[in-house]
Amino acid sequence: MKKKAINRFIKMIWPVVKFVITNFGQEITAFVIDTIKIKVKEKSNAKMEEALKNARNAEKSAESTNNPEQKLKFYELAKGYIEESEYHKRFLSDLLNVIEDTSKEVLETVQLKSSEIKAEDLFILDNKQGDLKPVENHKVLEFDSNNRN
């Protein structure tokens, strides 16, 4: 009797559970991706700002000296800091493009894999006792390093 009740419960409730798993998986994935984007932007922007601050300081030092060699040295230093800031800007842009492309792929994979989940992937019906037990150490999302560019 208990076994029949559990089977009926799974048949009736599983579509709702699957819907929740799919949506929650998408939500968690999007949250993680957005958090990574924010942290990457913060870190890169801080590096850009630091380089620009150093460039401004070097330019001020160049303007405050009367020694032509020192002036040239400080302007070259400022130029180097500006180039560093521009490098961080390009790197951030490239990295955000990679994250954006990857996030689309990851969200699609999460959607696909979560839509393929069956109750049997997560639960085992113990026929002797009629109990429903969780499947242990079962991974639904496996990273396939052979399927990468």
Image (cartoon, rainbow, N blue to C red):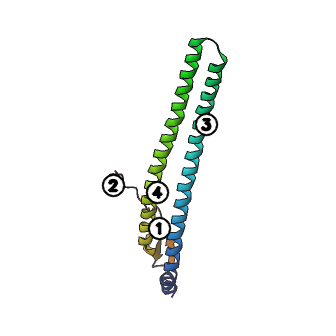
- Percent x, y for residue 127? 45, 79
Tell me which amino acid carries mark 2: Asn
Most extreme residue toward the right is: 64
Marked residue nearer the N-terminal end (3 or 4): 3
- Residue 147's disc number: 2
Marked residue nearer the N-terminal end (1 or 2): 1
Spatial CA span between label 1 and label 2: 27 Å
- Asked if the residue under mark 3 is in contact with the one under mark 1, i.e. CB atoms within 8 Å, the reply is no
Residue drawn at point x = 65 percent, y = 23 percent: 60
Task: Give the number of marks.
Answer: 4
Residue drawn at point x = 57 percent, y = 25 percent: 78
- Percent x, y for residue 53? 63, 31
Marked residue nearer the N-terminal end (4 or 1): 4
- Asked if the residue under mark 1 is in contact with the one under mark 4, i.e. CB atoms within 8 Å, the reply is no
- Percent x, y for residue 118? 43, 74
Tell me which amino acid carries mark 4: Ser
Q: What residue sits right under mark 4 in the picture?
A: 103
| Above or below for 48 versus 130 | above
Marked residue nearer the N-terminal end (2 or 4): 4
The mark closer to the camera, 1 or 3, is: 3
Most extreme residue toward the bottom is: 1
- Percent x, y for residue 147? 33, 55
- Displayed quadrant of residue 71: top right
| Above or below for 60 versus 110 | above
| Above or below for 8 versus 62 | below
Q: What residue sits right under mark 1 in the picture?
A: 135
Please tell me how crowded label 1 is: few (under 14), some (14-19), or many (20+) other residues with Cα within 10 Å.
some
Marked residue nearer the N-terminal end (1 or 3): 3
Residue 130 in view, yes or no: no
Spatial CA span between label 1 and label 3: 50 Å
- Residue 49's disc number: 3
Residue drawn at point x = 36 percent, y = 55 percent: 144
